[in-house]
Every structure is written in C-alpha cells, then in structure tokens.
Image (tube, grey):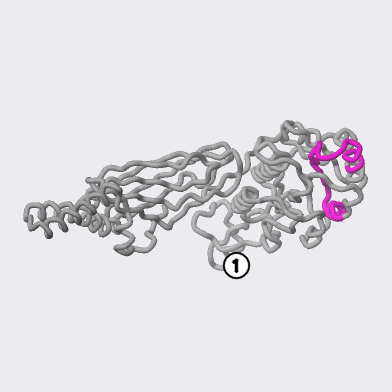
Amino acid sequence: MRRAGGTGGRGSLRTAFSGLTTRGRSFLAAGLAATGCAYLLGQSELLRVGALLTVLPVLSVLVLHLGRSRVAASRRLTPERVVAGEESRVHLRVESTGRGARTGVLLLEDRVPYVLGPRPRFVLDRIEPGGHREVSYRVRSDLRGEYPLGPLQLRLTDPFGMVELNRSFSARNVMTVLPPTESLPDVLPGGEGGGVGTPVRSTVSFAGDDDVIPRGYRHGDDLRRVHWRATARHGTLMVRREEQPHRERCTVLLDTRGSAWKGSGPGSPFETAVGDAASVVAHLLERGWAVRLITDTGLELPGSGTRPAEGTAETGTAIMEALARIDHSEHTDFAELAAVPTPPGDGLLIAFLGAVRVGRHHDLERLRSRHTSSVAFVAAGGQEEIVERRQHRELHEAGWTVVPREAGTPLADDWLRAAAPPAAAAG
C-alpha cells in the first residue's frame, strides 16, 4: 500500500481563491457591489446583505483551504503482477486526518494509461473527522508492459458550491503485465527425443560412511541422517550432508532487433516470440532446470555472477519481469553476444529469432558451438520465401535445429516438432 503525500502543502491563498466557481465569483462580485452601493447611499440594510454575500465565498475558500491539508489518500494494487489479459483491482482509501468539521463532497480521479481503460472517477460523501472512504476499480491490459498508476487527484467542494479546490498526491504504483504463457509437452527439443519430466539427477553417490563429509546438527534435521562415527569423533551431533543435485541448463535467446520483426500489437510476431520465450522459461523452471535469458543487446539474466543452480524462483521472477519490459533494440546483428560468458558444453540453447540476413549468422554459429544442443524457432513470413529457405539452410548447416514459427500456431505443436529427428524438424 502506498500512502499519497500532497504536493505543496496548504499552498497559497491566491491559489485557493482561484478555485472560486462561477457561483462563488458571482456572490463575491454582488457582495462587493452591494457594499459599495450601501456606502454611497447610506443604506445599512444593504450593507448587511453585501457583507453576507462577500463573506460567504471567502469563508468557503478559507475552510476548504485549511481543510484540504487534512485529507490523506492511499492506493493498493492487488495483484501488482498479472498476466496479459487478466485483471487487477486498485483499492483507493481516502481518510480525514483532522479533528475539526467534516470534509465537503470529494471528487476523486485516478490517472491511468489509456490502455488500461477509462480514467476512473468517484464522488465521495463528506468524511467525518478520523473517518475514511474506500472505493476500487479494475484495470486490465492485453499487452505486456509496466504501467504507472497515479497520481491521484482530489477535488474538494463546499456545500454551497462556491469553491472547488484540487489536490494532487505524489504517490504512484506500477502495474506489471507479464507476457502470456502456454503449457508445453514434456519432451526435450533438439532432436534427442528425451523427456524432461525428471531433469534433476544426483551427481553424488554414497558408497559408505567414509565417503560422506558431515556437518553439525541443525534444528529440524532428520535424526535418520545422524553420522554416528563423526558424532563420536567430534563430541557433538553430526549429520550427513544432503545430496547436491545436478541441474540441467538451458539458455533462452530472444532476438529483439527492431529490423528483424514486422508488425506490432498483441498478435505481432515479436510479441508472440516474447510469449514463447516466457513459456519455455516457465516450463523448464517448473521442472528444476537452471535457465538464463540472453538477448542481442548482451542482456543476461541471471547475471554471470549468479550460480544457475541457486535462486530458481527469484530467477524466474527476474526473467518474467524483464520480458514484461523488453522492447525492440536498434541492433542489426548479434555481435553483443560475444560479451556474454558461455562455457563450452553449456547445455541446451533455444533461440526465438526474427529475420536473419543471409550470410550474417556467424555470431549465432559461435554461440551454438558452445552448447550441446541448439534449437532456433524462426518467425515465418518476415521475408520472401526463397530468402527464408536459404536462411534456414544456413542455420541448419551451422548446427541448429530450425523450426519455422507460423503465425497462430501453438508453441506446443512446434515444441513437439523440435523434439522430432533433425531432418523432420528442419522441414
């Protein structure tokens, strides 16, 4: 929850008087005119009327001017991260922090990007001292991204309609819309035909007690893992260490070059590729794989200083949020990939590519050579058919399993094709 702070405190009286409505200005003008006429004509009764007409809008200005600083507001977004096409609810809370009279009628308006829907507006009844009012509205986007919500604007009016004063709050929230994902079959792409249902396997075998490096007992450890020989030697309770699993590794390459993609919007080839990359990341992370995301800009998530076997949940969150923000780059090639550290034999490589110019695949070939298996899902229809065929042939000769991605084809179908024998997948 974010509490909204005011901008500028109480402000100046000149600003407050600028909030007089047409009715308030008319009353003030009539009061001043009546007062002047009463003074010139010597009419005391007219003087009282003029004073009343003048004082009423002035008092309204002063009351609202002093009272608007005693109104606080907050915003809460649940959830803050949603998948494209899903809804999130924004909860607004306005409270009176003063000890004086009630507030006037409040007109509440929150600023949201147009892609999330119309700007929400609410009319709130007067709030008693120490009281509050709560309202909510829904936001939804079919396109991934980060969308700012706010600032919240509050308009206060007096019961007589003499004055309208605006107050803007500084706090903002950010709604993150993640790319949509789809379920994938439990097969391993790359022409190997294996399954990925149980990818985590142990690399440590215990032949006997002498092969085990024990550690001190911790609260909650299973007593069946107590290493009695080490316990007798050290004089304190010792337990066997847990097996250290070996994680299969996968690198997902997303081509973000603006020149490689045509069209825009939720159904465009680039947005499809972003969703495909997110689907692969989610699919493999759920099965215990260590996954990283790289792009033609040299972006690497998680960074090279992060051990791929650690922080799977945190890695997934970081990658998904990066995919929500990612946009076209100005690069024309993949030269920046040379700066991404990749040791030889670094597991599976899955690339989602746009149009690659014929004869410009050398950086991709070098990247492929450092992985045990490589699959390229190449967007179809981005260029002439004869050029596409030549592009696919060059990638295939460089060692890639090439799978054309037709518009509207579920990734699950092409995922199965990628797991087929290389000759079938390349067709």
- Say how many tags the image has: 1
Q: Position of residue 162 (x, y in %)?
A: 25, 49
Q: Is residue 72 left or right of residue 344?
A: left
Instruction: Estimate the x, y position of residue 81 in percent, counting from the top left.
Output: 53, 46
In the figure, is residue 349 to the left or right of 386?
left
Give the left or right position of residue 286, taking residue 120 as reference: right
Across and down, in percent, residue 319 comes to 64, 51
Task: Name the image quarter holding residue 184.
Answer: top right
Q: Is residue 384 magenta?
A: yes
In front: 380, or 294? 380
Closest to the observer: 187 or 269?
269
Q: Which residues are magenta?
A: 363-391
Which picture quadrant has residue 19?
A: bottom left
- Is residue 157 or residue 374 the one in the foreground? 157
Residue 114 visible, this angle: yes
Tell me if mark 1 has few (under 14), some (14-19) or many (20+) residues whose alpha carbon lies within 10 angstroms of its own: few
Magenta stretch: includes residue 135: no
Residue at position x 77%, y 60% in the image: 340
Q: Which residue is most to the bottom?
A: 234
Location of the C terminus by quadrant is: top right
Which structural element holds mark 1?
helix
Give the quadrant of residue 122.
top left
Above or below 204: residue 264: above
Circle 1 is placed at which residue position? 233
Give the residue displayed 63% in from the left and 42% down from the top. 179
**Three-letter amino acid code of the residue under disc 1:** Arg
Q: Position of residue 288 (x, y in %)?
A: 67, 46
Residue occupying the point 76% across, 51% down: 257
